[in-house]
Image (cartoon, helix red, strand yellow):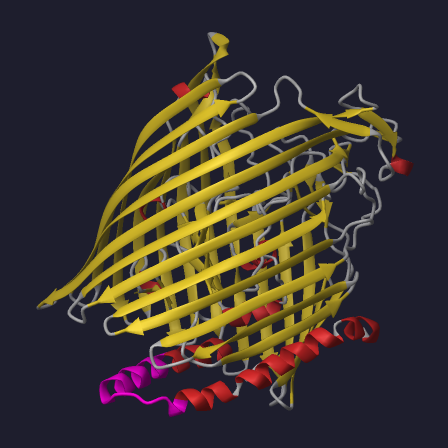
Amino acid sequence: MRSVLNKYNMSFVFMLATVVATAPLVQDTARTPRTTADSAAAQSLLAVRVSADRSSRTQYRVTHTRSSTRTLTPLRDVPQSITVLGPQILRDLGLQPMARAMEYVPGVTMGQGEGHRDAPTIRGQSTTADFFVDGVRDDAQYFRDSYNVSQIEALKGANALAFGRGGGGGVINRVMKQAEWTPTRSGRLQSGSFDERRVTIDVGQGLTSQLAARVNALHEKSGSYRDFVSHEKSGVSPTVALHAGKTMLRAGVEHFVDSRTVDRGIPSASGRPSALDWRTFVGDPAQNRSSMTVNGAHVLAEYDNSRGLTVRTHTRAVRYDKFYQNVFASSAVNAAGTQVNLGAYSTATDRRSVFNQSDLVYASRVGAIRQTLVAGTEFSRQATDNVRLTGYFDDVSTSRAVPLTATGGPTPVTFRASATDADNHAVANVAAAFAQEQLHVGEHLQFVLGARYDRFAVRVRDHRTDAVTQRVDYLLSPRGGVVFTPLRTLSMYGSVGISSLPSAGDQFSSLSASSSTLTPEQFHNREVGVKWTPSEAVELNTAWYRLDRTNSAAPDPANPTLLVQTGAQRTNGVEVGVTGAVTSRWNVVGGLAVQQARMLNRTSSARADATVPLVPRTTLSLWNKVRVSSRASLGAGVVHQGQRYAAIDNSVRLPAFTRLDGGLFVSLPLSLSMQANVENVLDTRYAATSHGNNNIMPGAPRTVRLSLSVMP
């Protein structure tokens, strides 16, 4: 630990110096001349900010969200299942990749991600595109970090009214840190097993009564429990806020770079993960590499006339530039248990996206009836260039057999275009309008009714053939819900919703001459649930749901060369979640999910009655943090996943596993704190996830992470 800390000594000194240097700004701001009206407004705003900030540090529960209804609504008044991981939870878990935090969200499992990308399966629906930043689409394929994230929201069920196309099983929304008038002085230096080294800085405050600024920054350079694997990533995200009368203006930019060794895991053998050592690398570490650069900017303007009318417009522009190259296991281990086949390819993707969302919110009350009407529009344009090259071993063959004793050595492979490799330019344009009514009748009954109408147009040019394929879809996405609140602490709800996924697919890459004739797939979600807050600090929720996916493509029984839309899938399940402070000393987060996801009718990739991959019958996760003294707390967690199939053919099973985690938290003088997290305390060997049958990722062995933080 000492040697690693020495490497980051200068970074830590810089972090502390930054905090010390910016501290006088608090006094300078206090001396800034103000009018009486400005002073009153600023003091009122600061009072609200401080209260919310202190709450987030003392308990896990988050009480409100804007993402589901597009209005700031108490979670217990939202007619759908939502899990929110707030800032304190993210800090205590010590898990920076967004994907790892999803282990504590019931009903969500994460895939290996073929292109080294976040790939969740939510209520039986796998996706690579249902990610959002402050409610705006973030659909590129990469690993997201939480260095500038305030909270992560997992909204389950069909969510098209708020988020647009896709979102059939649910969506994951990151709420980003923004400039506030409350002073922020925090930094974190982290080290751990397998050469983990990471430093983050978060500094901000009000510069005047109207202007605030904040900067979040990250640098990480770490190894892995897997042989030859490492990654390095950096990010910086400055934001500003301007409060002028009844208008709030927020703006910010982000520059994020991630480069890493591509690790596709290990192959299967005899229908199970192979017995290879969990460290064994399969491929060529010199060839397996990935890089991702994200450059984004956003502007959010909100006007509130203080009489129930709010107008908000949010514009976000972002460019994603990704390169991905890999040599990987393309087959199972042979029957003799001596060798495995390798395949190889590379892809380069450049996506430029511009989004604009505008909302008009009007709230009023007449007697016992309160209503909040939301109407809005969304316009977007996304242009994507994608080039794929196939790997040829010895410049001849697309497959090569290697002995299991030498799976990670140098491999003579060249990359060039094959006849079927993609080289295309896709443009997707969206124009949408939506309206929603939240109607409160008395103190106990609420209705949520709304619909969204999208025009989704996609055009793909194949540069290899110069062929152009295009399609325009008109998507109607209704949603309805009722919430009954017999007690202030108890609500019961029922909801129905429909989402659609156009035939172009998550990434616009599925559009072809045959698929362009297909209408969008549809997702019908029906759900009932109960939310109970026995105290203001803790919330328990339960949801029962049925999610049907229809209009999936399937071979025509009369002519297998043609496609028909008769494929269907159904997921039935129940989720139980808990978040918050059980007592003043005990905080918890986690839940239980029991679900079954099966194919009702045959599709192009699955037989009828097949079980959807990466959907365990049962998942259980629970993290506990208990304060044992005025300066020390202990953490204990359990993560359990039942048996899963690795792919839709159901030929390879990933065994069930249970992992135990632990933590120690100590408050030190000078606003410092020390944290130690131990993952997989019992050093259990398990298969964490997969992408198909032969890219199975072994779970990490016992892993220790130590961090030193400064925070007022």
Q: Which residue is drawn at 62% across and 51% down?
A: 641
Q: Residue furthest right?
A: 405
Q: Is residue 369 visible?
A: no
The residue drawn where x is 12% and y is 66% is: 365
- Name the quadrant containing residue 504: top left
Camera-nearest residue between 581 and 18: 18
Name, please, the residue furthest toward the left.
367
Residue 120 in the figure: left or right of residue 447: right
Q: Return the residue found at the far front.
A: 33
Residue at 53 percent across and 42 percent down: it is 128
- On whether residue 271 falls in the magenta region, the answer is no
Locate residue 429, reporting x and y percent: 36, 36
Residue 466, relative to residue 687: is it above or below?
above
What residue range appears in magenta?
Answer: 30-48
Q: Position of residue 686 (x, y in %)?
A: 73, 50
Magenta span: chief secondary structure: helix
Give the number of marks: 0
For image coordinates 56% across by 30% down, the residue present is 610
Q: Can residue 364 be seen in this view?
A: yes
Residue 215, x across and y down, in percent: 52, 70
Q: Position of residue 373 (x, y in %)?
A: 19, 56
The answer to whether residue 608 is left or right of residue 345 is: left
Quarter of the figure with the N terminus:
bottom right
